[in-house]
Image: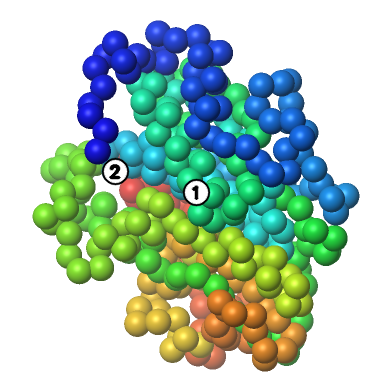
């Protein structure tokens, strides 16, 4: 374990120039295989062999998206990469680069910024080898904010959209369902003081299964490589389950103008957690045949549009089914 750094060795970002901060970040983030020009110029140049660029963006803001009492800089970097990589994978594309914008208070320690860079690098290495940070921006803000734009390439295939599901398709998923939501519940239920302020996680208070749930929440590991695999296998529709299966399945159903029939028995030991938990970043996909690519499992089927976009065991589902920051933030703020 690295020894704690003194203030002289670990200055705040307010004590450094933008150029010095950028050099420290760039020294830790690696180089993207598809980057012709990476960090250090006015813009990056990233190869797009298919002729099209898949792009997505996601923002993590201190308060609604993470709490510093619970997340390290490494956690934030890892999660910021993972949630964006999952959106690229859901289009059937291979991630090629990340653009990272970081806004932070000027009393932020440079070691924290370096930890964010480490998390970004190692998430890319683990989840999407060849992808890396290709550029970004820095600014000062009273609220720590990490915004990432991910780029990807479909490698000559058409993108897989939400709108392609057809009656008769099977509905399948790759990745965990409900585990990240359980991790969030552990944090809010057990690691806040009487006033509701988050406090650091105490490992002695964790129960069986809690470490895995916390890891799924703080350092998610979506099946990024299965996005292109699903596309090659003929997925007719696909999306990232970021806001909960109940909410995201309805989005796919609405985009395709179909009804999705879910089998609760296929959702694990706790179907409600699978349906209502958010931030799993599993891949939800439909396929025309029964033969699925490795890593996917059947959880239902696609039928003609009926009385509801989503039915579970034959009954229309109208529950909350996931995370909506505009609806749910007040219930967890504290």
Crowd tier of the residue under label 1, counting other residues whose Cα lies within 10 Å: few below 14, some 14–19, many 20 or above: many
Distance CA(mark 2)–CA(mark 1): 19 Å
* Residue for badge 2: 70
Q: Residue furthest right?
A: 51
Q: Nearer the viewer, residue 302 or 328?
A: 302
Residue 229 locus on image (x, y percent)? 68, 70
Horizontal side, residue 122 vs residue 193: left or right: right
Residue 233's quadrant in the figure?
bottom right
Horizontal side, residue 123 vs residue 208: left or right: right
Name the residue located 65 percent from the left edge and 27 percent from the top edge: 39
**Residue 210 in view of the camera:** yes
Name the residue located 80 percent from the left edge and 43 percent from the top edge: 47
Which mark, residue 147? none
**Residue 308 in view of the camera:** no
Horizontal side, residue 243 vs residue 76: left or right: right
Relative to 26, residue 218 above or below: below
| Element carrying mark 2 | loop
* Residue for badge 1: 123
Mark earlier in primary sequence (2, 1): 2
Residue 27 locus on image (x, y percent)? 52, 27
Q: Nearer the viewer, residue 88 or 25?
A: 25
Relative to 14, residue 225 above or below: below
Name the residue located 13 percent from the left edge and 56 percent from the top edge: 205
| Element carrying mark 1 | helix
Name the residue located 32 percent from the left edge and 62 percent from the top edge: 213
Judged by depth in the image, the label closer to the viewer, 2 or 1, is 1
Residue 201 locus on image (x, y percent)? 21, 47
Relative to 27, residue 275 above or below: below
Image quarter (top left, top right, bottom left or bottom right) of the C terminus: top left
**Across the whole image, how many numbered discs are drawn on residues?**
2
Residue 290 locus on image (x, y percent)? 67, 91
């Amino acid at each position: 374990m690295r020894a704690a750094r003194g203030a002289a060795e670990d200055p705040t970002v307010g004590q450094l120039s933008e150029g010095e901060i950028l050099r420290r970040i760039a020294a830790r983030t690696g180089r993207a295989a598809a980057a012709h020009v990476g960090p250090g110029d006015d813009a990056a140049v990233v190869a797009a062999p298919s002729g099209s660029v898949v792009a997505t963006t996601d923002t993590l803001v201190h308060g609604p998206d993470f709490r510093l009492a619970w997340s390290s800089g490494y956690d934030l970097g890892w999660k910021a990469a993972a949630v964006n990589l999952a959106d690229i994978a859901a289009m059937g594309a291979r991630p090629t680069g990340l653009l990272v914008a970081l806004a932070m208070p000027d009393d932020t320690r440079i070691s924290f910024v370096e930890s964010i860079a480490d998390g970004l690098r190692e998430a890319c290495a683990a989840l999407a080898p060849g992808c890396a940070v290709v550029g970004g921006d820095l600014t000062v803000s009273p609220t720590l904010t990490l915004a990432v734009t991910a780029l990807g390439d479909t490698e000559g295939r058409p993108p897989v959209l939400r709108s392609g599901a057809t009656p008769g398709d099977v509905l399948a998923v790759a990745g965990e369902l409900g585990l990240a939501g359980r991790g969030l519940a552990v944090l809010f239920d057990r690691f806040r003081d009487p006033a509701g302020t988050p406090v650091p996680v105490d490992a002695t208070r964790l129960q069986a299964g809690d470490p895995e749930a916390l890891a799924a929440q703080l350092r998610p590991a979506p099946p990024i490589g299965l996005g292109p695999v699903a596309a090659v296998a003929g997925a007719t529709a696909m999306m990232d389950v970021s806001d909960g299966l109940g909410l995201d399945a309805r989005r796919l159903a609405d985009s395709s103008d179909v009804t999705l029939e879910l089998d609760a028995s296929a959702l694990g030991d706790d179907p409600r957690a699978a349906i209502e938990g958010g931030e799993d970043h599993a891949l939800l996909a439909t396929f025309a045949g029964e033969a699925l690519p490795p890593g996917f499992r059947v959880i239902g089927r696609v039928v003609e549009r009926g009385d509801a976009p989503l039915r579970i065991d034959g009954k229309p589902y109208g529950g909350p089914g996931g995370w909506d920051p505009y609806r749910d933030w007040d219930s967890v703020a504290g």
